[in-house]
Amino acid sequence: MSDMQLSPINFYEQVLSLRAQRQQLLASNIANADTPNYKAVDIDFNSAMQTALQQANPAELKLTSSNHLPNTGTIGTAEIKERASKQNSLDGNTVDMDIERAQFTENALQYEAAITLINNQFKNIASVIQNN
């Protein structure tokens, strides 16, 4: 299934879900910066998004009324991988705080951008409803 086949709302549902999952991983890396032998982890967002878009079996919701719309979205889960370390610390920890802070900030900005875009979609839908 390509992103052109998904409604914009379903597409951004995928984006927000993966961004939130990544933010939790990055926060965990930062929280464990002083933990001996902790290995920094991350996801490849682009790869995870492609996987999420290609899933053929969306989550099924029970329809209790003929007025309910069927669910057509999926929420992907990303493969968590250890981040390649540029230089390990003496205690075996691979967290590089400069990288983690930069990735955390970038991901947060991308999340906020997706929120803004989905809010615009809802405003467009509300505008269409009001004009009819």
Image (tube, grey):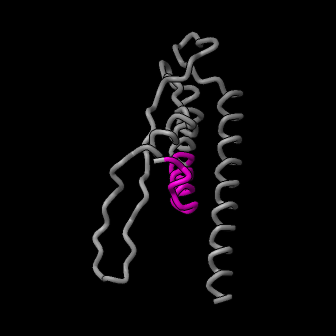
Q: Quadrant of the C terminus?
A: bottom right
| x and y percentages locating residue 87 in the rendered image | 63, 11
The rendered magenta stretch, by its main secondary structure, is classed as helix
Going 51% across and 55% down the picture, which residue do you hit? 5
| x and y percentages locating residue 64 in the rendered image | 28, 79
Going 37% across and 69% down the picture, which residue do you hit? 70
Going 47% across and 46% down the picture, which residue do you hit? 53
Q: Is residue 16 above or below residue 86?
A: below
Residue 52 vs residue 22, the one in the foreground: 52
| x and y percentages locating residue 60 in the rendered image | 31, 61
| x and y percentages locating residue 22 in the rendered image | 54, 41
- When asked about the image quadrant of residue 100, the answer is top right
Going 53% across and 61% down the picture, which residue do you hit? 7
Is residue 32 magenta-colored? no
- When asked about the image quadrant of residue 114, the answer is bottom right
Relative side of 130 to 2, left or right: right
Is residue 7 magenta-colored? yes
Relative side of 131 to 33, left or right: right
How many labels sit on residues?
A: 0
Q: Is residue 88 above or below residue 61?
A: above
Magenta segment: 2-19
Q: Is residue 19 above or below residue 131?
A: above
Q: Is residue 31 above or below residue 81?
A: below
